[in-house]
Image (cartoon, rainbow, N blue to C red):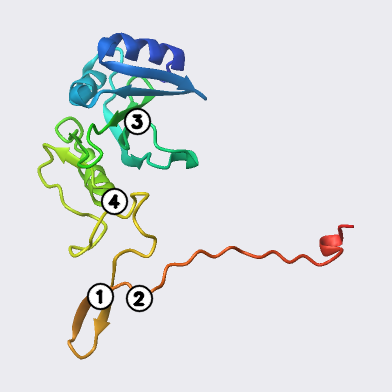
Amino acid sequence: MTSFAVNPETTKINVETALGDLLISSVLRLGELTIVVDSAHYLQAAQILRNDPSCRFEQLMDLCGVDYSTYKDQPQAGLRFCVVSHLLSVSLNQRVRLKVFAPDDSLPVVQSLCDLWSSANWFEREAFDLFGIVFEGHSDLRRILTDYGFIGHPFRKDFPVSGHVEMRYDSELKRVVYQPVSIEPREITPRIIREDNYGGLH
């Protein structure tokens, strides 16, 4: 095992060489390498990143979904849903961020990485629960944070802040009941009032 970090430029070259035509883009910024692959080659690319001697990303540290529909308050350009994975090579002391976009915005589906890294299991369930991204090949894809009666996917940009339903305990029925949200959605703009000489400023 090496005790030094591989130079990020070297990591970039090694990853680009290992993946070849499977890469859509490869960007090194602020010392972090971000690569994008096509959904059709996602599992193949991930397997190469794990097994290639110059990559050896043995650990999947994190996986999450991203909704790009209003990214940076700009109109959507390109596909909406993305899966972002952070991979670590303990043996080579290097990292890479792997991104893949689901090809269908109405039913986002990408392949599961559970067969390559068991840590993907709960991460993919979370991305399914919160974003509605389906991971093909996942053996137990079900909600993990919201309850069984939850409607929708709360991290999507078009999901209402107040949600669709609320639950409460009904003392007469002696159970939890679901009902339509009773809170009226409203937008509050804070009003700032500052006195003269506030904070000693003139």
Q: Earlier in the sequence, mark 4 or mark 2?
A: 4
Marks 3/2: CA–CA distance? 36 Å
Frontmost residue, 25 versus 80 = 80
Which mark identifies residue 179? 1
Mark 4: secondary structure: helix
Amino acid identity at mark 4: Leu
Q: Position of residue 179 (x, y in %)?
A: 25, 75
Marks 4/3: CA–CA distance? 21 Å
Residue position for label 4: 130
Q: Residue at x 11, y 37 (%)?
A: 137
Marks 4/2: CA–CA distance? 23 Å
Res 200 → quadrant: bottom right
Frontmost residue, 59 versus 3 = 59
Residue position for label 2: 182
Q: Residue at x 87, y 63 (%)?
A: 197
Which mark identifies residue 78? 3
Q: Is residue 64 above or below residue 95?
A: below
Q: Earlier in the sequence, mark 3 or mark 1?
A: 3
- Name the quadrant of the N terminus: top left
Q: Position of residue 14 (x, y in %)?
A: 34, 11
Marks 2 and 1 close (CB-CB < 8 Å): yes
Marks 2/1: CA–CA distance? 8 Å
Amino acid identity at mark 2: Ser
Q: Is residue 193 above or below residue 10?
A: below
Tell me: 191 left or right of 62: right
